[in-house]
Amino acid sequence: MMFPEYRPRRLRQNDRFRALVREHCVSSQHLMYPLFAVPGRNVKEPIASMPGVHQMSIDYIVEEAKEVYDLGLPAILLFGIPEKKDSKGSHAWIKSGIVQKAVEAVKKAVPDLLVVTDVCLCEYTSHGHCGVVVKEKKGVFRIDNDATLGLLQKAALSHARAGADMLAPSDMMDGRVGAIREVLDDNGFDHVPIMSYAVKYASSFYGPFRDAAECAPQFGDRRSYQMDISNSREAFREATLDMEEGADILMVKPGMPYLDIIRMLRQEFALPIAAYQVSGEYSMIKAAVQNGWLNENLVVQESLTAFRRAGADIIITYFAKDFARASF
Ligand code: PBG
């Protein structure tokens, strides 16, 4: 009988061998936890399609931030649902806006926790689109890319002034990273990094988020500005532009269905890469867990490890707290 010389199983014999040769690992330090801030006090409203995730008023957001910090997680990603929406999304940049106030409160209570803010208009516009909508003719609308840039600059500057540690533009307008970099630099915020949603697909996996952030488009869809799910070379072009415009971190979104894109960016760019395990990915796993079909701890560990293996440095995930709790 002939045996092969090399037997991979020799190094799988027990936990010590397996740990010794493990190529990738995930720990709490790599994770970022998204939070949804709403106006009011004492509000903690469950999001039906995302079990375990809530819309919270700032008092609860602060409590949550403390818990996140105590669990050893480095950062939160803040989204805001404003008191009032209008066609331009003006509550995205007012000083007393929901995100601005939430940032101030969290930084005061937990100064060492990194507070990252999502910069986008869709939560603030009455039509739910991420940019300024112009009517071409009856029933035909267009997003005005360049008119949107000025509004994003205002929103970004207001977040920085409120004390945000990093900004994450998610609108997918062309030129937004450069526009935001410029306004930050011109106003004394050259030290504030930009984590760009560089490669954001027009994905159906955002469904539950749109309940959470109350930002489903009232007409049409986002395919004129988010990427076509069929494309990968385009991801390279988008990432190249954002890098040239000054992005500090490149993000790919959604996560698990796009591991090939994460890997491609990892190979092509030296910047840190973030992956967003989005709402739909979270809801699928949670639903299966609730039915007793999957083991939550094991599946979360596996899915987060897959992101790291594909090449992600940072993972934005609604499982961050669960993961941190399980690994303590
Ligand atoms: C837009 C934004 C979206 C998400 C993050 N930022 C939604 C969208 O583009 O429709 C999705 C996140 C998720 O699904 O978890 N501000």
Image: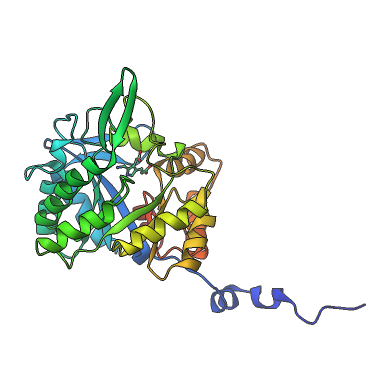
Residue at 26%, 47% in the rendered image: 35
Nearer to me, 224 or 99? 224
- Up/down of 252 relative to 140, above or below: below
State which image quarter holds ligand 1: top left
Nearer to me, 221 or 105? 221
Quadrant of the drawing holding the N terminus: bottom right
Residue at 40%, 58% in the rendered image: 239
Q: Residue furthest front?
A: 137
Q: Position of residue 119 (x, y in %)?
A: 24, 48
Q: Residue furthest left?
A: 96
Q: Position of residue 184 (x, y in %)?
A: 15, 59
Q: Position of residue 69 (x, y in %)?
A: 24, 60
Quadrant of the drawing holding the C terminus: bottom left
Quarter where residue 60 is shown: top left
**Residue 158 seen in this snapshot:** yes
**Residue 274 seen in this snapshot:** no
Q: Residue furthest bottom?
A: 5
Nearer to me, 268 or 161? 268
